[in-house]
């Protein structure tokens, strides 16, 4: 089949009829599959069932320093839990504070603190309409935090090596631009890893706002899929070397390592930011769940154990990513109606349809029984200016279910493109 844009009127009509017939068959299959979020599959969760038995007796509740994990205290986390998360994040244990099960919670709390109390300056709420740089497409929950707090979002294009840094450096001359979201390794949804040059440019920034912060959400730092792993510079080291020790705040969790609902999270930062975080936490909590921290360090006594566990995760995910990419390539290559990423890790494949076709594609899939992330969700305010980006989350379905869903998906991409071209 030649590219759709080169088809004449009769060829378009014939192809539209054939694709519509194929789509109608999918509608009769009674598919029922939700691929709207990047959830670990049951087989991945089973890899962590040892957590349920990690504390088998009433005498096993003490941490290595003798702390009774059942009681109050240890605000920053157990020493061995800080070591575990430090090894995962590539930082030093003294730079780490361990939280609850959600790194998103830690990010939200940090920005609430900035809004209400400030980050060494006046509270953001008293400074006017503050703004955030949002590399796009990006993570919808980051954008949701900003929208909830009334922080104006400024989309910046994601390039092959990270955010468009020329545009970022232009924007930070505004003192009301207070920060930037970053998912620097295997970004959500494109799977892009920031280049060394991009990381160094971020670390060397001199924003007009002294209370500007880079929210470095390194959610997929150890989530390789397949044999090749991307490398990423350590933002905290680069910031320190550039004379900006408190420019970036790093976040991570075990949400997609062990149990998403019962993992542990961490924030890593320079001493100035850690001091501010401790001040808040002393009023906010008596301490996070140390029993759960202990369970994790018993399951992962060292970084090698953690990496062996992630290798098993990769073995489950790799055939799913291969299935997605093989079907996209087989069915859409050469048609000129879509492009997609081929990430080495993370949880998503990003697909760009023809302009004004993403919403229709998602609707067609939903009506045939497959729920995808809403079109526009990967942009601030849910508004994709081209209506072209769709996030594919391959992790939860079985390979067989995923293959059926992807066959429907590529049919829907074709159908939406043909409908648009035929109407022109």
Image (cartoon, rainbow, N blue to C red):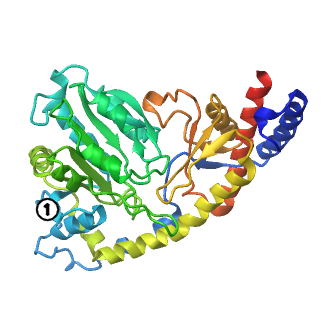
Please indicate, yes or no, whether residue 54 appears anywhere in the rendered image: no
Which quadrant is home to the N terminus?
Answer: top right
Give the tally of numbered discs.
Answer: 1
Residue 176 percent coordinates (x, y): 23, 25
Q: Quadrant of residue 18?
A: top right
Asked whether residue 205 appears in the rendered view, the answer is yes
Q: Is residue 254 left or right of residue 421?
A: left
Q: Residue at x 13, y 62 (%)?
A: 94
The answer to whether 320 appears left or right of 209 in the picture is right
Residue positioned 42% across, 53% down in the render: 193
Q: Which element type, helix, strand or loop, lies under badge 1?
A: helix
Badge 1: residue crowd in 10 Å (few <14, some 14–19, many ≥20):
some
Horizontal relation, residue 162 to residue 209: left or right:
right
For residue 315, above or below residue 101: below
Front residue (pair 193, 288): 193
Rendered location of residue 55, percent (x, y): 28, 76
Q: Quadrant of the C terminus?
A: top right
Residue at figure coordinates x 72%, y 47% from the top left: 332
Query: What residue lies at 82% left-to-right and 40% top-to-bottom?
Result: 19
Quadrant of res 116: top left
| Closer to us: 416 or 161 | 161
**Circle 1 residue:** 94
Q: Position of residue 352 (x, y in %)?
A: 60, 39
Dividing the picture into quarters, in which one does residue 220 lie?
bottom left
Residue 150: % across, % down: 30, 25
């Amino acid at each position: 089949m030649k590219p759709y844009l080169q088809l004449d009127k009769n060829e378009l009509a014939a192809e539209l009829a054939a694709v519509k017939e194929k789509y109608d068959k999918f509608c009769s299959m009674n598919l029922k599959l939700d691929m709207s979020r990047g959830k670990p599959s049951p087989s991945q969760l089973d890899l962590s069932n040892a957590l349920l038995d990690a504390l088998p007796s009433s005498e096993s509740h003490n941490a290595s320093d003798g702390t009774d994990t059942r009681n109050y205290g240890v605000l920053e986390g157990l020493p061995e839990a800080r070591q575990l998360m430090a090894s995962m994040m590539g930082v030093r244990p003294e730079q780490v504070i361990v939280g609850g099960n959600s790194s998103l919670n830690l990010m939200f709390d940090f920005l609430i603190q900035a809004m209400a109390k400030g980050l060494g300056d006046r509270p953001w709420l008293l400074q006017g309409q503050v703004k955030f740089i949002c590399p796009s497409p990006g993570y919808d929950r980051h954008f949701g935090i900003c929208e909830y707090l009334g922080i104006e979002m400024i989309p910046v294009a994601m390039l092959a090596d990270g955010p468009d840094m020329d545009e970022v450096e232009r924007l930070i001359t505004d003192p009301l631009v207070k920060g930037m979201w970053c998912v620097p390794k295997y970004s959500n949804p494109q799977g892009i890893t920031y280049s060394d040059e991009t990381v160094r440019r971020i670390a060397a920034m001199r924003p007009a706002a002294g209370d500007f912060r880079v929210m470095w959400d390194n959610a997929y730092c150890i989530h390789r899929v397949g044999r090749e792993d991307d490398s990423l510079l350590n933002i905290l080291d680069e910031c320190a070397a550039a004379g900006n020790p408190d420019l970036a705040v790093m976040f991570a969790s075990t949400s997609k390592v062990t149990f998403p609902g019962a993992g542990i999270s961490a924030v890593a930062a320079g001493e100035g930011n850690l001091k501010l975080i401790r001040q808040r936490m002393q009023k906010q909590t008596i301490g996070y769940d140390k029993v759960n921290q202990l369970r994790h360090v018993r399951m992962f006594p060292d970084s090698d154990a953690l990496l062996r566990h992630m290798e098993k995760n990769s073995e489950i995910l790799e055939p799913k990513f291969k299935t997605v990419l093989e079907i996209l390539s087989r069915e859409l290559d050469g048609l000129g109606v879509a492009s997609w990423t081929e990430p080495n890790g993370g949880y998503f494949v990003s697909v760009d349809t023809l302009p004004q076709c993403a919403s229709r594609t998602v609707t067609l899939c939903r009506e045939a029984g497959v729920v995808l992330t809403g079109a526009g969700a990967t942009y601030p305010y849910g508004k994709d200016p081209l209506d072209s980006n769709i996030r594919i989350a391959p992790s939860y379905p079985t390979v067989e279910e995923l293959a059926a869903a992807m066959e429907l998906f590529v049919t829907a991409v074709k159908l939406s493109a043909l409908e648009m071209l035929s109407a022109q």
